[in-house]
Image: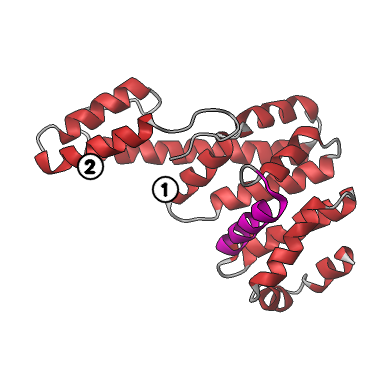
Amino acid sequence: LMRCLQQMLTPKPNLEEFVLSAENINRLILGLASPDARTRNITLETMAPIIIFTEDGHSKILSAFNHFKFKKRESRRFETVLDILRHEKSGEMVISSLLILNSLINTPEDLDDRMEMRNELLSQGYGEVLEELRKKFPQNNDVMTQLRTFTEDRDVDEEEFTDRVAERSAKPVNVKDARALITAMMESVRDKPYMHGPFLETMKHLLSMPMDKTRGLRL
């Protein structure tokens, strides 16, 4: 059934009509919970074109992941996909999972949206997952391509973010050094009394963030 659905959605007009209904996508994503590995893989393969080729496909798939989290009582969004990457022995399904996550990260045009998406995954141990995949599939060119895509796009975004900070700061700031960032933020608001209150509230919220691995780093 899932394979038939995938073939029906191959023509772009069919795909665009399918995604007009959020219920269609919500039903599709439930295939990730199937005990059948082939069904899970086809589900992933069918979702990727929705992100890449349809209008608002990115936001619609994110909403579907929210639906899946609620229905399957995940503690965090994308928990099931990350579990697939941690335990799956099939290179085919690993490739499909990586493609979905890379597409979700890289599709937004806005830098802040890309960094937020990437950091949501990294806060769940995605960096360690990728390192294990490098060791597990060193000869799989498609897996390695997806891993390189993540790393290269992350580096490009970090460079763009560094340039943005440099434009707004009187002195160079090492954005990978937490102490340097805090110092730069304090200096940037020092002569702006109207920013003292909002800055203090932000710092208080940062200090109260949950930091255990189960809940992750979330405001």
Instruction: Look at the image and give the residue range highlighted in magenta.
Output: 58-74
Where residue 165 appears, x then y in whole percent? 30, 37
The residue at 47%/45% (across/down) is: 116
Residue 204 placement (x, y as % from top left): 31, 33
How far apart are the two marked residues, 1 and 2, measured between alpha carbons?
A: 20 Å
Is 173 displayed left or right of 90 in the figure?
A: left
Q: Is residue 209 above or below residue 49?
A: above
Q: Name the quadrant of the C terminus.
A: top left
Locate residue 183 relative to residue 123 in the image: left or right: left
Hey, what amino acid is under mark 2? Answer: Pro
Residue, disc 2: 198
**Image quadrant in which you'd find residue 21:** bottom right
* Three-letter amino acid code of the residue under disc 1: Asp
Task: State which tag comes first along the sequence, 1 or 2.
Answer: 1
Magenta stretch contains residue 166: no
Give the residue drawn at x 62%, y 69%: 54
Element under label 2?
helix
Q: Element type at marker 1?
A: helix
Residue 62 in the image, given as x and y percentages of width and height: 59, 57
In this view, the residue in front, 167 or 70, is 70
Q: Given contact means CB atoms under 8 Å apart, are the residues at marks 1 and 2 in contact?
A: no
- Disc 1 target residue: 112
